[in-house]
């Protein structure tokens, strides 16, 4: 076979191969071209915020940022999160993260950590950029950042709060022990439960008696809380000495390393005739704190030779002063007669 014949056969084979490719994959080349030129679309979903590391002055807010990608490749994608103080309107901090090129129809997820002062609330503005061009925005808010417990102060122990409305046991029980010299000793009891999986302790319980009408602190005391086993409840008692015949709020504070971790409020009524803020009904009640004393006062010694204790006259208020004045007038009149 001569040279021209070989070239003819080769040309026929090339034509047949081209026809086969077209028959097996029609539009394949066109599809690839369409994929390259399709515009990319990134849609930002509602972000989720969780607390990260929490310190005494600063707190980390962890954002779970999710985007839906459709279309062609999105190149040089950058996500920016800006925290704005909701009280002042000032920018607290700004963080950015490069995601590079995003391709394929899928959900894209990234985590952004923003560290702010542990106080107030913040608006978190989210912006998505592609090649320096902003293509998507979103926003969310957080409040009560100051209520986040620092990591070093976390504890599984807290006050036991009873459900059941007015018939449930009080969170702080109070018992009147002794009344003496217009002072009443109150013994308070609070229930502490360890809801963790291991022993916990090293806490300080502070109990404060606050007079209802004036909010004046009548007395306060603190007790050390020993280790509590997991799943167990203990009752911690603390004694307060307050002026009698007043009503009090009883505030209990639980601290760990000087950081407040839990608090509850109860009440003690030593004067039921005075209305409490939640009840405007007024009813006079003959109430003596000594009637509820857990430890009765010892009776005075009535044996022979014992010196009797002085007692007040059964007269009304001011009777002693009037009697003394009348006696002085009588003595003066008697002296005047003798001098005549």
Image (tube, rainbow, N blue to C red):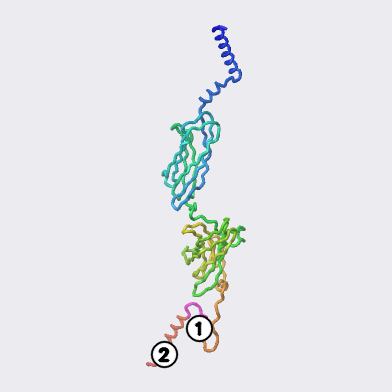
Q: Is residue 312 magenta?
A: yes
Classify mark 1: helix, strand or loop.
Answer: loop
Disc 2 residue crowd, few under 14, some 14–19, many 20+, Cα 10 Å: few
Q: Position of residue 4 (x, y in %)?
A: 54, 7
Identify the secondary structure beneath mark 2: helix
- For the question of whether residue 209 can be seen, the reply is no
Q: Earlier in the sequence, mark 1 or mark 2?
A: 1
Image quadrant where residue 329 sits? bottom left
Circle 1 packing at 10 Å, graded few (<14), some (14-19), many (20+), is few
Give me the disc on residue 177: none
C-alpha span from label 1 to label 2: 33 Å
For disc 2, the marked residue is 334
Please tell me whether mark 1 or mark 2 is closer to you in this view: 1
Q: Quadrant of the C terminus?
A: bottom left
Q: Is residue 25 visible?
A: yes
Part of the protein shown in magenta: 308-319
Q: x, y (%) of residue 147?
A: 49, 52
> Pointers 1 and 2 in contact (CB under 8 A)?
no
Q: Nearer the viewer, residue 321 or 292?
A: 292
Q: Position of residue 150 (x, y in %)?
A: 48, 53
Residue 92 point in image, percent of width and height: 42, 45
Q: Is residue 317 left or right of residue 233?
A: left
Q: Is residue 94 left or right of residue 21?
A: left
Q: Which residue is mark 1?
A: 309
Q: Residue furthest front?
A: 1
Residue drawn at x 46%, y 38% is 97
Residue 256 is a magenta residue: no
- Residue nearest the observer in this picture, 5 or 212: 5
Secondary structure, magenta segment, majority class: loop
- Rendered view: 246 above or below 41: below
């Amino acid at each position: 076979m001569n040279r021209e014949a070989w070239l003819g056969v080769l040309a026929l084979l090339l034509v047949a191969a081209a026809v086969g490719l077209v028959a097996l994959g029609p539009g394949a080349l066109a599809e690839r071209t369409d994929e390259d030129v399709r515009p990319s679309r990134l849609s930002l979903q509602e972000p989720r915020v969780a607390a990260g590391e929490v310190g005494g002055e600063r707190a980390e807010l962890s954002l779970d940022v999710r985007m839906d990608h459709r279309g062609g490749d999105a190149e040089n994608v950058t996500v920016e999160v800006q925290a704005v103080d909701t009280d002042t309107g000032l920018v607290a901090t700004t963080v950015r993260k490069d995601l590079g090129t995003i391709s394929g129809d899928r959900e894209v997820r990234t985590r952004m950590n923003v560290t702010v002062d542990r106080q107030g609330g913040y608006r978190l503005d989210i912006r998505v950029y592609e090649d320096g061009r902003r293509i998507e925005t979103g926003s969310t808010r957080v409040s009560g950042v100051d209520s986040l417990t620092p990591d070093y102060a976390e504890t599984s122990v807290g006050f036991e709060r009873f459900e059941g409305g007015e018939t449930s046991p009080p969170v702080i029980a109070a018992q009147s022990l002794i009344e003496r010299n217009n002072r009443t000793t109150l013994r308070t009891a609070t229930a502490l439960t360890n809801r963790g999986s291991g022993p916990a302790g090293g806490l300080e319980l502070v109990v404060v008696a606050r007079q209802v009408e004036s909010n004046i602190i009548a007395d306060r005391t603190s007790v050390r809380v020993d280790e509590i086993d997991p799943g167990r409840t203990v009752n911690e008692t603390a004694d307060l000495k307050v002026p009698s015949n007043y009503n009090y709020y009883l505030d209990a504070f639980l601290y760990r390393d000087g950081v407040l971790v839990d608090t509850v409020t109860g009440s003690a009524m030593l004067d039921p005739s005075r209305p409490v803020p939640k009840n405007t009904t007024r009813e006079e009640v003959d109430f003596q704190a000594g009637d509820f004393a857990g430890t009765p006062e010892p009776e005075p010694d009535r044996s022979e030779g014992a010196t009797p204790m002085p007692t007040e006259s059964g007269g009304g208020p001011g009777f002693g002063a009037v009697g003394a004045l009348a006696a002085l007038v009588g003595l003066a009149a008697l002296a005047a007669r003798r001098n005549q």
